[in-house]
């Protein structure tokens, strides 16, 4: 058996290049910060220079506002098994970044399925219990997406994830009997959730939940709330490749987020321009191991108990709601191209998506047709 780590190694090597591009954003006073990608897909936020046609008159009229906007603060932290970077612009940028880092630490300590001091670990040990406001919100959102995706997003899949070794790092391929024996224990519908009393009761003693498929998106959304509450109007958070941005960049242009090519590690399938959006990608190339020449990735299909094999190798969700984007990037990957397209058509206006297939075909939804740039042939999905 062989664990493949080259994605992490590549990310570490490339972080020096990424960090200067991430924080420049056309601002002369921005300071650099390290950005290292962990298990999530690699993204890159590109620098954008000011428009060369901008007149001196406009620059003078806006000089005071630009000076204010150019004040920046940045910070990074290791949490949720990856390196995270936070960047904010404005007069309260320093306070906003400090509060954001505190929030990341708080949520990391609460939501881990393996940390014995976490709320999720305690719930799994005691087969339920009273929920904090955050975990109650996350269970409610998870239940909503579970139902809307026909069970493809399933936080109760954790017992299956454990027997594959993705939780411990002791990778192995379980036999069908082991998987079949756990089917009743991964049925999310058998977990009783009471919203008013904020309580959770598991349907069996073997049931366990894992919020890994929603935690980073929820965290980035919380950081956006912190930014807004402190008057920050321009900022970005990169949680190991899960990117969410607030407003425009200080120079007035949109943020440019590149999506890694899962086939060619040092290239990108395209760049999407966004503001006030999250860009979150899931793919089978992120975490995997090989046994007897077969690759097994970490995105498990709840219907089979095996890694999803639907022809997609990368799914990116572009959405104003970081929590929803995180859930859907996994769910639609499991659905496959046709299922993802059908789901999008039923939920138009909620999100856009970028699909990349094993045949290296690239599909995007019509909502980002004018903001996505790629050298590859693009098929635009419309209603």
Image (cartoon, grey):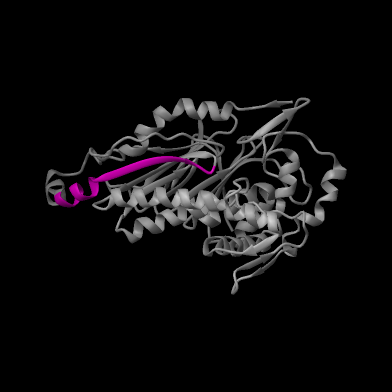
Quadrant housing the C terminus: bottom right
Q: Is 71 part of what is drawn in magenta?
A: yes
Could you tell me how many numbered marks the image carries?
A: 0
**Residue 43 percent across, percent down from the top left:** 48, 38
Quadrant in which residue 128 is drawn:
bottom right
Q: 310 or 15: which is nearer to us?
A: 15
- Residue at 59 percent across and 69 percent down: it is 198
**Residue 203 percent across, percent down from the top left:** 76, 62
Quadrant in which residue 348 is drawn:
bottom right
Q: Is 286 part of what is drawn in magenta?
A: no
Q: Residue furthest bottom?
A: 196
**Residue 36 percent across, percent down from the top left:** 46, 34
- Residue at 31 percent across and 40 percent down: it is 25
Quadrant in which residue 21 is drawn:
top left
Q: 23 or 105: which is nearer to us?
A: 105
- Residue at 29 percent across and 48 percent down: it is 94
The image shows residue 183, relative to residue 281, as above or below, that is below
Quadrant housing the N terminus: top right
- Residue at 66 percent across and 65 percent down: it is 200
Q: 327 or 332: which is nearer to us?
A: 327
**Residue 250 percent across, percent down from the top left:** 28, 47
Residue 364 visible: no
Give the left or right position of residue 118, taking residue 68 as reference. Answer: right
Q: Which residue range is magenta in the image?
A: 64-80
Q: Residue furthest right?
A: 177
Residue 139 visible: yes
């Amino acid at each position: 058996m062989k664990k493949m780590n080259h994605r992490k190694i590549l990310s570490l090597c490339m972080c020096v290049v990424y960090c200067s591009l991430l924080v420049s954003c056309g601002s002369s006073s921005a300071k650099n910060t390290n950005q290292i990608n962990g298990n999530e897909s690699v993204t890159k936020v590109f620098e954008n220079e000011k428009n060369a046609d901008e007149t001196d008159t406009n620059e003078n009229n806006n000089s005071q506002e630009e000076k204010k906007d150019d004040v920046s603060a940045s910070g990074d932290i290791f949490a949720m098994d990856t390196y995270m970077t936070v960047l904010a612009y404005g007069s309260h940028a320093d306070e906003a970044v400090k509060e954001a880092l505190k929030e990341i630490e708080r949520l990391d300590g609460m939501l881990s399925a393996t940390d014995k001091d976490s709320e999720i670990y305690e719930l799994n040990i005691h087969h339920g219990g009273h929920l904090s406001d955050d975990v109650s919100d996350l269970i409610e959102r998870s239940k909503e997406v579970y139902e809307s995706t026909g069970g493809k997003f399933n936080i109760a899949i954790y017992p299956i994830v454990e027997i594959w070794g993705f939780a411990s790092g002791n990778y192995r391929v379980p036999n069908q009997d082991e998987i079949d024996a756990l089917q009743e224990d991964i049925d999310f519908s058998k977990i009783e959730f009471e919203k008013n009393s904020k309580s959770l009761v598991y349907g069996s003693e073997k049931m366990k939940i894992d919020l890994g498929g929603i935690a980073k998106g929820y965290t980035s959304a919380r950081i956006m709330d912190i930014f807004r509450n402190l008057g920050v109007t321009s900022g970005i958070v990169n949680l190991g490749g899960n990117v969410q941005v607030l407003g425009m960049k200080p120079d007035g242009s949109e943020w440019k987020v590149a999506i890694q090519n899962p086939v060619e590690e040092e290239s990108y399938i395209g760049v999407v321009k966004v503001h006030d959006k999250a860009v979150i990608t899931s793919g089978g190339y992120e975490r995997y191991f090989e046994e007897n020449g077969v690759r097994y990735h970490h995105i498990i299909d709840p219907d089979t108990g095996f890694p999803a094999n639907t022809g997609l190798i990368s799914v990116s969700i572009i959405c104003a709601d970081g929590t929803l984007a995180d859930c859907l990037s996994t769910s639609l990957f499991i659905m496959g191209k046709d299922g993802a397209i059908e789901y999008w058509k039923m939920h138009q206006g909620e999100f856009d998506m970028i699909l990349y297939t094993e045949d290296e075909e690239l599909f995007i939804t019509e909502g980002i047709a004018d903001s996505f740039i790629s050298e590859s042939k693009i098929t635009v999905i419309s209603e």
